[in-house]
Amino acid sequence: MSFTLHGLAVSGGIAIGQAHLISHATLEVSHLVISPRLVDKEVARFDAAVQRVREEFAQLKGRAQFSSAEFGAFIDLHMMILSDPELAEAPKHLIRERRCNAEWALVQQMEVLVHQFEQFDDAYLRERSYDVRQVVERVIKELVGQPGRMALRPGPGKGIREENLIVVAHDLSPADVIAYKEHHFAAFVTDVGGSTSHTAILARSLRIPAVLGLHNARQLIRDNEVLIVDGTRGVLIVNPDPRVLDEYRLRKSQIELERTKLRRLKTARSVTLDGIDIDLHANIELPGDVANALDGGAEGIGLFRTEFLFLDRGDMPTEDEQFEAYGTVVRGMGGRPVTIRTFDLGYDKDLHPGKVLGDRIQSNPALGLRAIRLSLAEPKMFQTQLRAILRASRYGKIKLLIPMLSQAHEIDQTLAAIERAKASLRAERVPFDEQTPVGAMIEIPAAALAIGMFLRRVNFLSIGTNDLIQYTLAIDRSDEQVAPLYDPLHPAVLMLLAHTIASAEKVAIPVSICGELAGDANLTRLLLGMGLRQFSMHPAQILSVKQRIMQSNCAVLAPIVRRLLRHEEPAKIREQLEKLNSLS
Ligand code: PEP
Ligand code: MG
C-alpha cells in the first residue's frame, strides 16, 4: 500500500531507495523461545557478554587519567550496576524458567530495576535509571555482536548496495550520524528531531536528503520497502506507484542538472553587483570535511565544531591527538583562515551520555553546563585543547572561537586561560602564532543585547543563529513538537541580528553568521541588507548563496531592509522579504 508522511525538510534533494530500519539496541529486542537443550548455552552466552562489558569498563577506567576525576567515578558506578545481582544474576533465572533468549531476559530485568529507581524521591537516585539503561544497552550490543556505538544493523542484503538504502530510525544522536560519514546511504529519515538539531546539521554535511520529525515512520515502514525521500519539501512516500516514481526520477535528474550548472560558479569571485566582496566560509565537523569545503568553493573555515571529532569515542582526546586533527585542517586549507571553535559539549553532545558531564544533574541541559561553561569548569580539558589549537597555528592562519559566552567574567576568564596556555607553550619554546585572534559566538540573547562588553574584549564575532533563535524564542531546536514555532524571521530575532551586525560594524570588529540561517539563499539579501559581509555554512550551500550574492546590490538592499526591520507583524515581514527576493 502506498502512503505519504510529512516531516521537517532538513537536507535538500531527492533519494529513491529501499528502507533500512535501525533503532537502539533495547528497542530491537524480540522474545524468542529456546529449546531446553540450549538453555545452558544461552546462560553461558549471557555470562560471556557481561564479562566482556566488565573488561571494557576496566580498560576505560585504565584510560581515565585522560579525563576528569568524574570519569573514573562514572565508570565505577556503571561497574556497580553491572554487578548488581538484579542485572547479573536474575536474567539467568529468567532464561532457565521461561526458556527465553538472553536479550529479552535482560530487558525484562532492566524494566524492573528502572522502575525501582524511578520510585525514589531523591532526584539524584531517580536519574540513575538512565545509567541502568546505558549499562543494559552495552550488554545487549555485546549479545548481538555490535559493541560500541548504536546498533547499526548488518549491511544490506544480497544484491543491495548501500547507496540505494534509506536509513529509517526513531532517533539518531549526533554521534550516530558522525558514524554514517563512513557509509554511503542514499538518505535518512527519523521520527524525532528539529531542523537545526545537530542531527539535522550533520545530515546536511553528509550531503544526502533527510527528513526528520516524521513521528512514527519507524513503526509504519517495513524493511526493504521502496521509499522516496524529498528532503526539500519534507515528504516521505512509501511504496510509490509507478507514475509517482517516474515523476520523482525526473525531478531528481532536474535537481542534478541545476547542481551541475551551479558548479560553474565555484571559481567565480563572491562579489555583489556594487562591488562589495563577501566572504563565504565553510562549517565543518571533521578533518575529512576539508575536501568538501574546498570543493564547495569555501575561502576559509568559518566554524570547525571540534566536539564532533570525539563524539563516538569513550575518552577525552590527548593534546597530541587534537594537535594532529587541527593541524590537518589548517594544512589542508593551504593558508586560508581556519576558525576553530573550542568544545561545545553538553546539551545534545556528550562523548557518550554521561561521560564528560559525569553525574552532574542536568535537569535542563540546554541551559546547563554546556560549551564554554563546561570548559571553564574543566580547566585541564580546556588547557589541553587551547594548547593543541595554538600549536596548530604554526601551520597557517587560525582564529580561536569560543561558544556560548554570556558574561563579561566568562570572557575574562577565557582570555586568561588562553594567556596561560600561551605562557606554557612559550616556556617550553613551542612555536605558535602570538597574534591568534580570539572571537566570541553570539548565540545567547543576553550577549547580543549587551554586545558592547564583547566588542571591547574580543577580536571578532560569529553569530550562532541556531542557538540564538532557540534561546530567544524558548524553542528547543531539537524538539519536533515545537518546530513550527522555530522562526528565524521572528521580529525579535531580526532585531538581535541587526543590532549585533550594526554595533560590530561601528567599531570595525568583523562579524559573521555561522548558524544554519547563513546557508539559506532566501535570506541572503536580507542579511546583506543588514550589513553582513561574512557568511559560514555547510559547503554544499555555498554556491547557491554565492549565486544570490552576485545578483544583489547592497546599496539598493540596505534601505529596503531598514524598512523591513521596522515591521513587527510577521505577515508584513514575509511580504517584504518576498519583495526583496524578487528584485531583479
Ligand atoms: C549555532 O548555534 O548557530 C551554531 C553555529 O553552533 P551549533 O549549531 O554547533 O550549536
Ligand atoms: Mg550553538
Image (cartoon, rainbow, N blue to C red):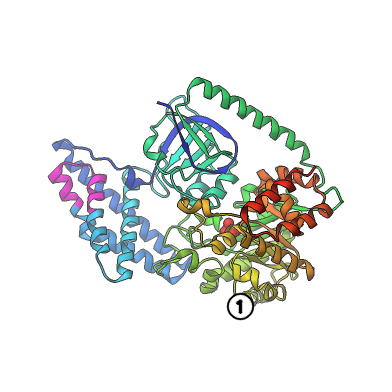
Of all residues, the one furthest to the top in this rendering is 242
State whether the magenta stretch is mostly helix, strand or loop: helix
In terms of secondary structure, where does tag 1 sit?
helix
Provide residue 190's location: percent of width, then percent of height. 46, 43
Residue named by callout 1: 413
Q: Position of residue 399 (x, y in %)?
A: 70, 63
Look at label 1 and name its amino acid.
Gln
> How far from the left and from the top, in percent, is residue 226?
46, 28
Write down the region rendered in magenta. Answer: 91-109
Question: Which residue is depicted at the point 44% across and 39% down?
Answer: 168
Name the residue: 37% across, 69% down: 73
Q: Residues within 10 Å of mark 1 (few under 14, many from 20)?
A: few
Residue 328 seen anywhere in this rendered image of the structure: yes
**Mark 1: C-beta under 8 Å from nearest atom of ligand 2:** no
Image point (42%, 67%), residue name: 362
Residue at x-position 15% and y-position 36%? 37
Is residue 92 part of the magenta span, yes or no? yes
Q: Nearer the viewer, residue 5 or 387?
A: 5
